[in-house]
Image: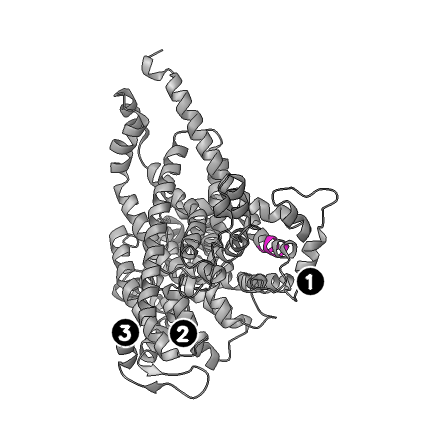
Amino acid sequence: MDRRLIGLGVLFVGPPLALVMFFMAYPLVYGFYLSLTSWNGLSGSPTFVGLKNFANMIGDTVILTSLWHTLEYSLTITFAITILGLIIAVLLQSKVRGYSFFRSAFYLPFMLPFAITGILFSSMYAPRMGLISAALGTLGFQALANIPWLGNPDTALWAVVAKDVWGATGFSMLLFIAGVSTIPEDVFESAKIDGASGLQTFVHVTLPMIKNVFTTAVVLFLILSFKVFDTVWVMTQGGPGRSTEVITTLLYKTAFRQFEFGYASAIAVLMFAIMFPLSLLYLRFSGFARE
Amino acid sequence: MAPHLQRSPVTEGKRTVVYLFLMLWSGIELYPIAWMFYSSVKSHVGILQDLWALPSPTDFFPTNWIVAWEGGYQNIVVGTYLKNSAIVLPFSLALVVFFAMLAGYYCARFPGRFVNLVFYFFVACIVIPVQSIVIPYFAMMRSLGLVNTYVGLILTYATFNIPFAVVLARAYFKAFPREIEEAALLDGCSPLSAFFRIIMPLSKSLMTTVAVVTFPFIWNELLFALVLMPSPAMMTMPVGLMNYIGQYTIRLDYMMAGLSIGALPSIVFYILFQRYVVSGVMAGSVRG
């Protein structure tokens, strides 16, 4: 290759590549090493312990619980925002007036930092005083108005899920709007001429034609929601007890509260092992970077 | 008029139902945000007395915002947090946009075995869950003395967002007409100056899209800001606002004011750049 072009390449690609290798790839590898050590992260240096961390992980119920909660969160939110986002996208495509307004309104919560809306919803979930409890009371559900949604281990996780459904539906909606808008107009026209009702059109025309977008979106939501941290952290920090502990909060606490960097790194490796292959599959599948 | 084009009463009824549902849902999505804003200028007592009420002439305290900004309540200085976020953001964005343009352009125009390898490396980096590298990352930054420094967080955000931006840029440049560069090269321009003098100025929409798409990943970010900038004077906005939680004496008025101040930049950003935000998401350019 032309020498000048190589020089150009080094100049153009070198710096970002160096940055990413040093600040992303290297920590990743270093993390793998740390998972084989025991270290408090503050003083001294890591002590090599081989696979002991991983052996301990097997019997650790907290890890299982966190994974389970993460799964519950991820599956529920994916299901909810897929359905809601799709329905809203389809409804908006039917040329309602105020399309612009609705689309903006629905997407706004997703633009706000989840930390901020998380804190907002924390205050809204307060029993009696909070907005949600007050609303339930006004609607006549007095018994529900007194429940400490975030303080009760049985309801806490679902309260968090509900908040993120509120926050993320707009994102799902946008994806599906993009998907539905690729269906050519005349397909809908001929469906109408054939006398198809709205519902029939939806089931037999729209859905099949967005199959790819649909699957891509669902996988994307699963992947993104698995990494949840912000909302859970500001709303419950994994509590009460461990009832909202997800894999990321467990990771954070093990490292920065319990100062077990080695064990936490092992958890990180577990998280990586679960997520990375799935994400790569997603990339392959969505043909994202193939052009 | 053909029968199937007439509006039947059934269709009208359905239209109304659709509208009602959309209005209801937009109410649910928007009301909490509106509530946050209008409660932020009420008094704490006023909020508790009537959650739903709008501020009234007797219950109107815009000074809450000043208290929140200056840290009059429990030393939660929202002004500082906003300042820190506002310092980190532009530098991170500049690095991301600049490097993405360079690398994206080169990968698009000069593909080869090695270059493609580099590109796929970037692609793979997009899907690394950064939460899983936070621990070694922190250890590394600490040994570099970059904890609680702007430089540290800026480099962090730049690095994490470059891979995706490079992919975006490469896609853009692949579709960029070659004639322009060829004309420049024929005129005796070096590839380097052709890029900076001609191509970059013409790629403003790409730069805006990259910046807009990257903005929320920097502005809203919590985990790494929490880990790398724990010192109260350096906290970014999401981290600093967390101080409102778990206070022994809760003051809803100041809390809402602080949250509102924090939310305002995102809203302004959204109003200004909505077109780019929407097209960024909808172009299927979605991060994993």
What is the magenta range? Answer: B257-262
The answer to which of B178 and A117 lies nearer the viewer is: A117
Q: Which residue is mark 1?
A: B70
In the visual, does A201 lie left or right of B250? left
Residue at 46% across / 83% down in the picture? A42
Q: Nearer the viewer, residue A281 or A74?
A: A74
Residue pointed to by mark 3: A59
Residue A124 image offset from top left, x and y in percent: 53, 51
Question: Residue shown at 69%/59% (left/top)?
Answer: B67
**Between marks 1 and 2, how big is the CA–CA gap?**
34 Å
From the image, tell me which residue sits under label 2: A254
Considering every residue shown, the one lying at the far top of the view is B1
Find numbered disc 3 in the image and state the secondary structure of the residue it sits on. loop
Disc 3: CA contacts within 10 A as few (<14), some (14-19) or many (>=20): few
Decide if residue B174 is in sight here: no
Nearer to us in this view, A24 or B139: B139
Q: CA distance from mark 1 to mark 3?
A: 49 Å
Spatial separation of the CA atoms under disc 3 and disc 2 = 16 Å
